[in-house]
Image (spheres, grey):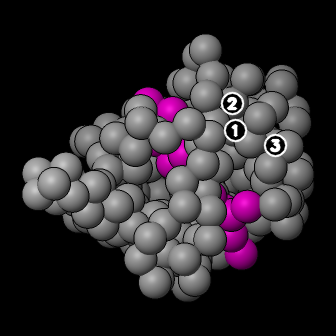
Amino acid sequence: MKIANEIIYFGKLIDEKGLVSSHAGNISVRVNENILITKSGTMLGRLTSKDLTCVEIGDKKDKNLHQASMETVVHEAIYKNSNAKAVIHTHPVYSIILSFFLKDRFIPIDSEGKFVLKEVPIISAEKTISSKEVADKIGKIANLYPVAIIKSHGVFAWSSSVEKAFYLTTALENSAKIFYLTEKWKKENS
């Protein structure tokens, strides 16, 4: 599948799964020393090739940087510090809810979550959107984990393909929902 078509396809799936609000989230793919990334303010559910731009990793003067996703700084940190070929950033509700109540990590209780994710770091930052602080913190763990929750903001998942990053995102949200509903049930029935 052509890279742009892959981004468009998974953008629609992310929207259909309710992992973002209408104009939130972003997707990127590494192409050598460049990143093909969604533009700022695009609708993942309605992406076209015109909604993508290419920026050189680490080039602060790249002419396309001004139209790239606000989260490009975090995508770059992941690419610089891991072998990732794709990054997805979403705002899944249950994962964000957990970030308010868990301190620094989420350990899934369901079998799939334990097998696929093991544990997921929760990153706190003063500024969470388009944040150099988040980029620095996620860069330090990018080679240790394939996914992280940014407290009160969302999830970044990275892997060898957009499909695998999407799988990590949906596995995390599913595990977060199971955890949340289990804790709620225990509280209501104790």
> As shown in the figure, which amino acid type bears the numbered disc 1?
Val
Residue at the spot 85% in from the left edge and 66% down from the top edge:
83
- Helix, strand or loop: magenta stretch: strand
The disc, 2 or 1, on the residue closer to the chain's N-terminal end is 1
> As shown in the figure, which amino acid type bears the numbered disc 3?
Gly
Q: Which of marks 2 and 1 is in front?
A: 2
Q: In which quarter of the image is the C terminus?
A: bottom left
The magenta span reads: 145-160
Please, which residue is most extreme toward the front here?
Answer: 190
Asked whether the viewer can see residue 5, the reply is no
* Circle 3 residue: 139
Q: Position of residue 1 (x, y in %)?
A: 55, 85
Considering depth in this image, is 125 or 32 the residue closer to the camera? 125
**SS at badge 3:** helix
CB-based contact (under 8 Å), mark 2 and mark 1: yes
Asked whether the viewer can see residue 101, the reply is yes
Residue 153, quarter of picture = top left
CB-based contact (under 8 Å), mark 3 and mark 2: no
> In the figure, 54 relative to 153: above or below?
below
Considering depth in this image, is 45 or 101 the residue closer to the camera? 101
**SS at badge 2:** helix
Residue at the spot 56% in from the left edge and 24% down from the top edge:
128
> As shown in the figure, which amino acid type bears the numbered disc 2?
Val
Instruction: Find the distance from the CA under tag 3 to the CA under tag 2.
Output: 8 Å
* Circle 2 residue: 134
Q: Where is residue 24 in the image (x, y as percent from the top left)?
A: 37, 39
